[in-house]
Amino acid sequence: MLLTDEYEDTVCGDPTVTWGAGATGFWVMLFVFSKIPELLDTVFIVLRRKPLIFLHWYHHVTVLLFCWSAYSTLAASGLYFVAMNYTVHAIMYGYYCLQALKMLPRSFPAILITVSQILQMFIGTGVCISCWYYNLTGKSCQNDQSNLIAGALMYGSYLYLFADFAVRRYLFEKPKGKGAAKKLA
Amino acid sequence: MSTLSNNLSKALKYLPTLISTPLENNFKSEYFTDFAANTWPFAIGIVISYLLFITIGSKVMQMVEKPFDLTMTLACWNAFLCVFSFIGMLKTVSLSLNNNAVHYCCKYMTSMYINRFLT
């Protein structure tokens, strides 16, 4: 990513101006608090007695706590995470819905979902590290230091876990046809 | 070409407010950010009960004869989250590419691609 002045403005600007108020602010608020009802995903897995992988519940727990922390410390870079996550979730939940209805075409490349998730983790880690760098070099960047470290660790660990999942699922596992993609996040 | 990128950035900027209710437009985040800052025990409590639910729930489900068939409920839940996330995407993505960034990206792109074809 190009670290231009424009980019710095988008991750460092005062959130009350950038994403705090108005329609965008309203949807950022909904995003943060929607992490609570999203825990229902796991309730479905448990009640349907489906395999529950570590990545799934680790993701739900850490996302909830990170959103809480980022929102309460007014993390300037927050809008990047919100916008990315909304986009990936729109695709992913659409995929899960079709999967539950058994309406997915057999040829649907499930790897696209995993790739979009891995891409999200790459950008997320990058944004956190760049803000950290801005803080270290003494630029005025409205991001709480411990929130950034938590974010970088969180995104980094997701990156590792999703990549690990992708390698095992797409490189080593024999294709099983439909229903092979496990529920992730 | 700069008018094109200017118009594009303007259009993107107004996308979140295109179809939005007064509730959204007059929204102020202070109350909610303060709420998040003051309710850490609540968030941690939710996480602990979530983990307890997983541990106890899985054990209970092992004892139950047949797992629940919640296919349709799950499909509806996922459909709801899909629509919700899609609207959220429309409301947030455009602003994360702020005016300057869009201007920058488009100026760069036009000089890279369009000019090459035109000249």
Image (cartoon, helix red, strand yellow):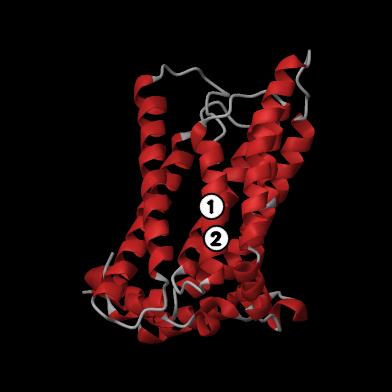
Residue A124 lies, in percent from the top left, at 40, 57
Q: Amino acid at mark 2?
A: Cys
Residue A108 lies, in percent from the top left, at 52, 32
Horizontal placement of A3 versus B78: left or right?
Answer: left
Q: Which part of the image, by quadrant, shows the C terminus of chain B?
A: bottom left
- Indicate whether B61 appears above or below B100: above
Circle 1 SS class: helix
Residue A102 visible from this viewpoint = no
Q: Which part of the image, by quadrant, shows the N terminus of chain B?
A: bottom left
Residue for point 64% across, 44% down: B48
In this rendering, the count of numbered labels is: 2
Residue A5 lies, in percent from the top left, at 29, 81
Residue for point 53% across, 52% down: A63
- Indicate whether A113 appears above or below A177: below
Q: Are marks 1 and 2 in contact (CB under 8 Å)?
A: yes
Horizontal placement of B92 versus B73: left or right?
Answer: left
Residue B26 lies, in percent from the top left, at 71, 84
Please, which chain is the residue tagged with disc 2 on?
Answer: A
Residue lying at the far front in this picture: please name it: B41
Q: CA distance from mark 1 to mark 2?
A: 6 Å
Q: Nearer the viewer, residue A9 or A109?
A: A9
Circle 2 SS class: helix
Horizontal placement of A23 versus B103: left or right?
Answer: right
Question: Which numbered disc covers residue A63?
Answer: 1
Q: Nearer the viewer, residue A61 or A3?
A: A61
Q: Nearer the viewer, residue B93 or A63?
A: A63
Q: Quadrant of residue B63?
A: top right
Give the residue number, with chain letter if any, for mark 2.
A67
